[in-house]
């Protein structure tokens, strides 16, 4: 399956001036993994109802537009939209029908979520006044899963103007504050404040002849021994003038109402300008190590796939820092210190060296004089990370040689696929020779298929004529090969599936389950578990410090953990998998992850909790996150509780939480609602008020 995700952040969305036919356009993005098609997202925040044709205040619309590109004319695919929180938690998913797009074609999708997103649950959807939309597009095709993504940003420009002045009612009963725009170099508003017998009156007059669209005005008056006065209002199209009265409190004395006042005016308005940017993330031929769920993304601070913790990333970090490396790979000019556990897990040849009766077993040194330093570095990078990102043919040929020599079949598959996707008339003879030299029937079959399809051009080329003189027997065999259709019928389809070749996690799992090269015993009060120091040190900061203090350590006690917890812990450290666990097991693993400083296990358990979160267990998870000071997990649970208010109130656990720990429940409520409630209390509803 080929997949692409575009995540679009619209900043200062509350100051969107777009109405009627005006729309916000995302930066254009290239979907490399979807045949190099180019797309744009479009948002109409105040769309008309598709039923009545009028703006009822209930709808906003999304558009997916294909631009002119070099992709196929008609491109069919599936797609979905998601509304995402600031923590990358998917709040709502919208799934339109499959779409066939030619350049210039638009997919229109109306929604009736405007009130929920922009009003009722604004604090949840628009944290920091940012609306985040995610468009996921996919197409089932090809032998290799390809994934790509990029991040777009649209910043709606605003200007924030703050003016402060003093007012002494004993001297003057009127004060004028001018709101001056540095951006426009002009006065936008004049604010006249009148100190009357019963209160303050403010008269706001628009001075700029240009129509100010979306804007917010805030006013406050504070004095010694006086009750503060405040006013706030917003407009979609600001009127020419606004008058507002604010009565004094009945409790104020006659003396206090004449005390000096500190006046503050804040005016925020949209300039009608916007800036766009896009951050490209290089697509990979496969997901590294696997495309994370939305829950995993929500636990990664940056929200980027490259920052997702994994055993491969941890092992590579161990190698980069040269911690506990125990084997030397020596080329003609330099040495690479690596981890025997990784070599043996990924390569049967290295496994035979270090487990059989060979000199490398005792010398702990492998001489590799037939590989260049650069090639060996890339080869090691694949062994550690399962990552293949090479784009130069000559470099891939060298990697292919290393993969064949050390029987790393998965790397051979990626190299073979690279060759198949980059065959042309100028290199077809070299690739045919390469396949023959390594007795690679699968690669040879791919090359011969290409020759059959393009035989007229190839046989007339000077390259082929020169090749015929040097390799007449190989040319004769190629000329006699079967037709493309017959050959395709005879090919076993599974030979070309990437899933046929174990990945890094599969290899580490096999190493753990076979107990091959185990070099440390984990002891509980009633059982012993063989493990690998390299794997333990890569995953746990605490275990790394313990083991690094004495390399001769051959046993380690974990008597504070139950046998099942230790077994699941070791399985996870070797495979990144929790296996088939229950909520109680995940809770114990979460405790262990914190005690032994295993960040990726903590994230994995958090994801398990979030994927299985219900109204019945939300209170328990909130308490768990609170006890461990896990602000990230706690925030996500609070998001869930805010989304399911009614269901939470009917559940058994939530009312009990309110009785057992009222401050915690109150904190949860306030953390998501305080700002919204304050705004509601301060705002005065007016006819011209901004209507989202």
Image (cartoon, rainbow, N blue to C red):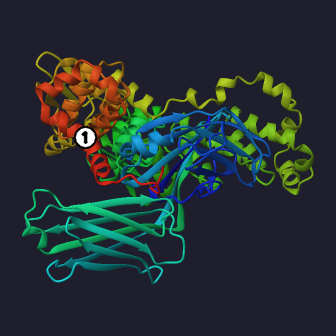
Residue 122 place in picture, x, y as percent: 39, 45
Q: Secondary structure at mark 1?
A: helix
Q: Quadrant of the N terminus?
A: top right
For residue 199, side relative to residue 252 (left or right): right
Point 17% across, 32% down: residue = 554
- As displayed, is residue 199 above or below residue 282? below
Q: Which residue is mark 1?
A: 537
For residue 495, side relative to residue 126 (left or right): right
Seen as rendered, the residue at the extreme front is: 197
For residue 183, side relative to residue 473 (left or right): left
Q: Viewer-proximal residue, 662 or 235?
A: 235
Tell me how many marks there are: 1
Residue 249: quadrant of the picture: bottom left
Residue 505 place in picture, x, y as percent: 42, 32
Residue 598 place in picture, x, y as percent: 25, 38
Residue 388 place in picture, x, y as percent: 53, 46
Residue 141 makes an appearance in the image? yes
Q: Viewer-proximal residue, 49 or 330?
A: 49
Residue 368 makes an appearance in the image? no
- As displayed, is residue 246 above or below residue 423? below
Point 29% across, 20% down: residue = 650
Point 37% across, 59% down: residue = 233
Crowding at dot 1, Cα within 10 Å, few <14 / some 14-19 / many 20+, comes out as many
For residue 476, side relative to residue 88 (left or right): right
Q: Viewer-proximal residue, 111 or 338?
A: 111
């Amino acid at each position: 399956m080929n997949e692409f995700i575009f995540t679009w952040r619209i900043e200062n969305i509350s100051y969107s001036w777009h109405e009627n036919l005006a729309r916000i356009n995302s930066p254009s993005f290239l979907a490399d993994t979807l045949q190099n098609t180019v797309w744009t997202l479009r948002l109409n925040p105040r769309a008309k109802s598709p039923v009545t044709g009028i703006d009822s205040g209930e709808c906003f619309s999304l558009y997916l537009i294909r631009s002119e590109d070099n992709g196929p004319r008609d491109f069919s695919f599936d797609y979905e939209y998601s509304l995402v929180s600031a923590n990358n938690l998917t709040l709502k998913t919208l799934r339109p029908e499959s779409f066939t797009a030619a350049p210039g074609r638009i997919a229109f999708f109306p929604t009736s979520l405007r009130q929920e997103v922009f009003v009722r649950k604004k604090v949840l959807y628009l944290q920091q006044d940012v609306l985040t939309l995610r468009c996921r597009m996919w197409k089932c095709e090809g032998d290799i899963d390809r994934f790509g993504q990029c991040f777009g940003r649209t910043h709606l420009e605003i200007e924030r103007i703050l003016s402060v002045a003093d007012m002494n009612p004993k001297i003057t009963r009127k004060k004028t504050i001018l709101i001056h725009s540095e951006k426009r170099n002009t006065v936008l508003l004049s604010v006249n404040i009148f100190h009357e017998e019963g209160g303050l009156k403010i008269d706001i007059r628009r001075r700029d002849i240009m129509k100010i669209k979306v804007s917010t005005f805030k006013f406050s008056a504070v004095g010694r021994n006086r009750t503060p006065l405040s006013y706030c209002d917003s407009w979609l199209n600001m009127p020419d003038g606004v008058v507002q009265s604010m009565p004094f409190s009945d409790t104020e004395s006659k003396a206090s109402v004449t005390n000096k006042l500190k006046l503050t005016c804040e005016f925020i308005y949209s300039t009608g300008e916007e800036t766009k940017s896009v951050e490209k993330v290089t697509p990979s031929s496969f997901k590294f190590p696997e495309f994370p769920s939305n829950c995993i993304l929500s636990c990664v601070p940056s929200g980027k796939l490259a920052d997702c913790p994994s055993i491969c990333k941890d092992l590579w970090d161990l190698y980069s820092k040269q911690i506990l490396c125990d084997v030397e790979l020596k080329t003609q000019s330099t040495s690479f210190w690596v981890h025997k556990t990784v070599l043996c897990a990924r390569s049967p040849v290295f496994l035979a060296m270090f487990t059989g009766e060979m000199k490398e077993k005792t010398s702990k040194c492998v001489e590799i004089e037939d590989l260049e330093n650069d090639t060996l570095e890339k080869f090691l990078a694949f062994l550690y990370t399962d990552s293949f990102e090479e784009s130069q043919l000559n470099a891939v040929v060298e990697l292919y040689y290393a993969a064949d020599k050390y029987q790393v079949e998965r790397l051979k598959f990626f190299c073979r696929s690279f060759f198949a996707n980059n065959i042309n008339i100028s290199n077809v003879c070299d690739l045919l020779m390469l396949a023959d030299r390594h007795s690679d029937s699968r690669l040879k079959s791919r090359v011969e298929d290409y020759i059959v399809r393009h035989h007229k051009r190839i046989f007339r080329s000077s390259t082929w004529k020169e090749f015929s003189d040097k390799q007449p027997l190989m040319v004769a065999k190629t000329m006699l090969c079967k037709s493309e259709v017959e050959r395709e019928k005879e090919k076993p389809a599974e030979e070309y599936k990437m899933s046929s070749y174990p990945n890094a996690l599969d290899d580490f799992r096999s190493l753990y389950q076979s107990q091959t090269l185990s070099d440390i015993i984990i002891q509980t009060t009633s059982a012993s578990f063989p493990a690998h120091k390299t794997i333990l040190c890569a995953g746990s900061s605490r275990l790394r410090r313990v083991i690094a203090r004495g390399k001769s350590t051959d046993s380690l006690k974990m008597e504070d953990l139950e046998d099942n917890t230790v077994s699941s812990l070791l399985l996870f450290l070797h495979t990144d998998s929790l296996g088939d666990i229950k909520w109680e097991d995940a809770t114990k693993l979460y405790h262990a992850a914190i005690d032994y400083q295993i960040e990726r296990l903590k994230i994995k358990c958090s994801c398990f909790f979030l994927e299985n979160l219900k109204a019945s267990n939300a209170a328990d998870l909130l308490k768990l996150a609170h006890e461990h000071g896990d602000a990230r997990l706690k925030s996500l649970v609070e998001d869930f509780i805010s989304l399911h208010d009614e269901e939470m109130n009917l559940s058994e656990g939530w009312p009990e939480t309110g009785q057992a720990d009222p401050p915690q429940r109150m904190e949860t409520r306030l953390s998501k609602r305080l700002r919204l409630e304050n705004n509601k209390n301060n705002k005065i509803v007016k006819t011209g008020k901004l209507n989202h």
